[in-house]
Image: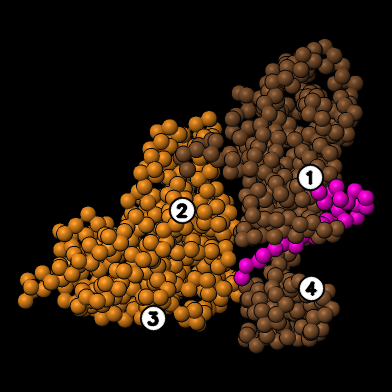
């Protein structure tokens, strides 16, 4: 039994008053981008619903893509039949059998928008329900708490049947909240922070600090893989800025007392990220900080680090527990990438006893003896910007004829 | 030469060999190494996994590389048994499985597992109710092949999967080695937990295969070592093999789309023409069979005699499955289908690829016909 359309229910968009049309447009654009692999689909939008007409495209593949798209509350694959009762009965049965396993109970929920239809709601429920009951042995109806709810919507042009309601990612369509730079380390937290900001409609570009030879090609590869995962929320497109950071880190090691190197390093990273943000016209910076998780994430540290900029810093994970963060990382499929054991620039130079309560005046004082300005500008100028695109284009470029 | 023994193995596509050579010589790094060569090798492996996942319509994370069908089957069956031996000690299979499944079951039997071997009907097909009747409170695995390697019967995998989805403690393994590229199988929708394929059956290279393990399903590894393949299959990855397998699968599935009618036509031609010959019994069912296998007996001659006689005239076929044909064993499948021992001893298997043509088929028929006549003259 093939579905011929997918009905999409908007998330918070529908409460957004006058901006609604703009949000719906963003979602449509997002969906279109995510579904470029399916050229025959047609996307129709109405005030409170969006429909994807499959036109013979693979429904399962489309469902997988939609599940992660921000701005969708839930969606249902739908079958369209004519108004002919026999056809409706048969379609309902087939749909039911596709989802049925022994022990399930069911009910029929009919909505009859077409008031001219010869059968009323109760009669339709009865006709379809009894047809299924006759064809499935030992099946029971349970109108209060069914395992399978066959939803039937009778309209003037056709009848639409669906069973599954698949939960979407929620949130708002990407781009509806402006752009921000994500500080992406390679650990478990920062991709999750990026995901949460994207879910809230923020368009994200990531900034990663790379310190060869102290950090390996592998750790960079890992970050590219994480960026690829995040790109899936945005139809496969994502921008990643790689900052050459070795010189600055070496200078910090040389010039700053050991227990303050971590604080100074974070301050430099934030300054550079802020420069990149300005260059690419972002409005905020997103980090994966979670309060008290490590030395750099105490309130004292944040005060000392945050001092370098007045740009809003979004910390979506700030009050979350590690276990909650890990759960999200697993859902968005970044956890197994993050836990690969490659050094990143934060773990290489970690001092034996970093200050958990650094003092702002002290770090300012230590930094005042060193001129970082020029190195910062150089780092920003030498940023390598990687544009991640949907897989299909990429595959041909890289190893081409091998596959 | 007419090569009609594609179920034993296929000739690798030249493009596949090229990929293998190129990856072996230019990207020889160990995927676990941390330098650039290692990174390249790993990303090739990842891309192979992704392509195979997409082609089989499963998540790439569900694709585990192995050395082939036999290893995949052993890993699926013994890995399940090892993992869940405290949950239950009963496992179910059919009477027509490949030796790597059959013997794995025998080995587990010796280790204290109870095994049920469900019978097949005269077409070589299992019945779903037989399987369901065999299920006990401590059943942990059902292993049923998709396409039988000797006669080509397609098993009702969809229905078995649907039935088994009501039993959450039982894993479902499908040996898809003969079916892949010839008969579609919806691994996800049919509720298959473990699924084996082997590259050399679809113009890939020997020594490469895949076990698909559905996400969330855990089985025990059989090899101890460096914990490659998410700890399920230790041993340095065969990157060149994996890449060339990904290519072979892509090319084969392309043929599946464009040449399925051609191979089916060749098969029906052979079935029809052979049926018309004297003293020939066809074992391949005419409905619900894979499009590439034709199994028949020429009454009165042992299979191997006929195979050798055909080979002299340039037609390459086999007796039963390649694995058992050297051992003079009588086909398990045919005996299970209630074919008499005498007729089963005469069995011949022809197996096609998308490369075979009607012209070859018509030559083959006339070779079979003359050979039968000549041999009969000698015997009388």
Residue beneath disc 1: A174
- Among the chains pictured, the one given orange colouring is B
* Distance between mark 4 and mark 2 Cα atoms: 42 Å
Mark 4 surroundings: few (<14), some (14-19) or many (≥20) residues within 10 A: some
**Spatial CA span between label 2 and label 3:** 34 Å
Q: Residue at x 78, y 50 (%)?
A: A27
Circle 4 residue: A156
Residue B121, disc: 3
Q: Nearer the viewer, mark 4 or mark 2?
A: 4
Q: Which residue is mark 2?
A: B254
Nearer the viewer's eye, disc 3 or disc 1? 1
Establish whether labels 4 and 2 are both on one chain. Answer: no
Chain corresponding to brown in the figure: A
Residue A174 in sight from this viewpoint: yes
Q: Is residue A386 left or right of residue A359?
A: left
Of labels 2 and 3, the one closer to you: 2
Residue appearing at x 70%, y 38% in the figure: A238
Residue B318 position within the rendered picture, expressed as x and y whole percent measured from the top left: 25, 63
Magenta stretch in the rendered image: A1-25
Tag 3 subunit = B
Q: Are marks 3 and 1 on the same chain?
A: no
Q: Nearer the viewer, residue B173 or B360?
A: B360
SS class of the residue under badge 2?
helix
């Amino acid at each position: 039994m093939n579905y011929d359309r997918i009905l999409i229910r908007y998330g918070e968009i529908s409460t957004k008053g006058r901006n609604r049309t703009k949000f719906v447009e963003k979602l449509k654009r997002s969906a279109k981008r995510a579904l470029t692999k399916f050229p025959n689909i047609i996307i129709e939008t109405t005030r409170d619903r969006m429909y994807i007409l499959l036109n013979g495209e693979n429904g399962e593949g489309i469902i997988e893509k939609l599940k992660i798209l921000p701005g969708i509350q839930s969606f249902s694959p739908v079958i369209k039949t004519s108004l002919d009762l026999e056809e409706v009965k048969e379609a309902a049965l087939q749909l039911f059998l596709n989802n049925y396993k022994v022990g399930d109970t069911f009910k029929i929920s009919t909505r009859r928008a077409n008031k001219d239809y010869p059968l009323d709601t109760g009669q339709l429920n009865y006709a379809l329900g009894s047809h299924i009951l006759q064809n499935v042995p030992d099946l029971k109806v349970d109108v209060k708490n069914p395992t399978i709810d066959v939803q039937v919507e009778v309209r003037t042009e056709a009848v639409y049947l669906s069973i599954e309601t698949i939960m979407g990612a929620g949130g708002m369509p990407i781009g509806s909240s402006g752009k921000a730079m994500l500080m992406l380390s390679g650990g478990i937290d920062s991709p999750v922070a990026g995901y949460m900001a994207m879910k809230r409609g923020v368009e994200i570009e990531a900034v990663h600090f790379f310190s060869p030879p102290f950090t390996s090609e592998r750790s960079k590869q890992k970050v590219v893989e994480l960026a690829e995962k995040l790109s899936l929320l945005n139809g496969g497109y994502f921008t990643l800025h790689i900052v050459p950071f070795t010189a600055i880190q070496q200078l910090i090691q040389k010039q700053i007392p050991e227990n303050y190197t971590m604080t100074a390093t974070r301050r430099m990273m934030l300054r550079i990220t802020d420069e990149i943000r300005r260059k690419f016209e972002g409005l905020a910076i997103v980090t994966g900080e979670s309060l008290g998780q490590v030395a750099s994430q105490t309130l004292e540290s944040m005060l000392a680090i945050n001092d370098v900029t007045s740009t809003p810093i979004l910390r979506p994970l700030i009050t979350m527990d590690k276990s909650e963060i890990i759960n999200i990382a697993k859902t968005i499929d970044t956890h197994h990438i993050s836990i690969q054991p490659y050094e990143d620039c934060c773990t290489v130079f970690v001092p034996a006893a970093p200050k958990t309560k650094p003092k702002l005046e002290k770090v300012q004082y230590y930094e005042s003896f060193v001129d970082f300005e020029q190195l910062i500008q150089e780092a920003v100028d030498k940023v390598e910007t990687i544009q991640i695109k949907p897989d299909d284009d990429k595959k041909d470029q890289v190893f081409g004829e091998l596959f | 030469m007419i090569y009609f023994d594609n179920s034993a193995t296929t000739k690798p596509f030249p493009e596949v060999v090229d990929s293998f050579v190129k990856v072996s010589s230019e990207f020889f790094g160990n995927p676990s190494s941390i330098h650039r060569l290692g990174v390249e090798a790993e990303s090739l492996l990842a891309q192979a996994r992704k392509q195979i996942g997409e082609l089989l319509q499963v998540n790439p994370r569900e694709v585990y590389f192995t050395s082939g069908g036999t290893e995949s089957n052993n890993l699926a069956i013994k890995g399940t048994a090892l993992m869940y031996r405290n949950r239950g000690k009963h496992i179910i299979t059919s009477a027509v499985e490949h030796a790597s499944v059959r013997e794995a079951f025998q080995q587990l039997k010796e280790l204290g597992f109870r095994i049920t071997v469900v019978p097949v009907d005269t077409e070589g097909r299992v019945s779903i109710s037989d399987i369901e009747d065999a299920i006990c409170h401590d059943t942990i695995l059902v292993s049923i092949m998709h396409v039988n390697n000797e006669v080509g019967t397609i098993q009702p995998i969809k229905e078995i999967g649907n039935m088994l989805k009501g039993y959450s403690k039982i894993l479902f393994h499908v040996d898809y080695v003969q079916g892949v590229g010839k008969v579609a199988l919806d691994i996800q929708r049919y509720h298959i937990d473990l699924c084996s394929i082997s590259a050399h059956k679809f113009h890939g290279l020997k020594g490469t295969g895949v076990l698909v393990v559905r996400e969330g399903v855990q089985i025990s590894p059989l090899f101890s070592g460096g914990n490659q393949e998410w700890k399920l299959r230790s041993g340095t990855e065969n990157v060149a093999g994996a890449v060339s397998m990904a290519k072979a699968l892509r090319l084969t599935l392309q043929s599946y789309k464009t040449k399925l009618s051609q191979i089916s036509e060749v098969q029906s031609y052979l079935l029809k023409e052979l049926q018309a010959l004297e003293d020939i019994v066809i074992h391949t069912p005419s409905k619900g069979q894979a499009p590439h296998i034709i199994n028949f007996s020429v009454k009165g001659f042992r299979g191997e005699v006929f195979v050798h006689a055909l080979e002299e005239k340039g037609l390459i076929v086999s007796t039963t499955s390649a694995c058992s044909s050297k051992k003079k064993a009588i086909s398990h499948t045919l005996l299970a289908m209630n074919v008499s021992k005498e007729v089963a001893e005469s069995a011949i298997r022809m197996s096609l690829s998308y490369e075979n043509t009607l012209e070859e088929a018509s030559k083959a028929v006339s070779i079979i016909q003359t050979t039968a006549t000549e041999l009969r003259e000698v015997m009388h």
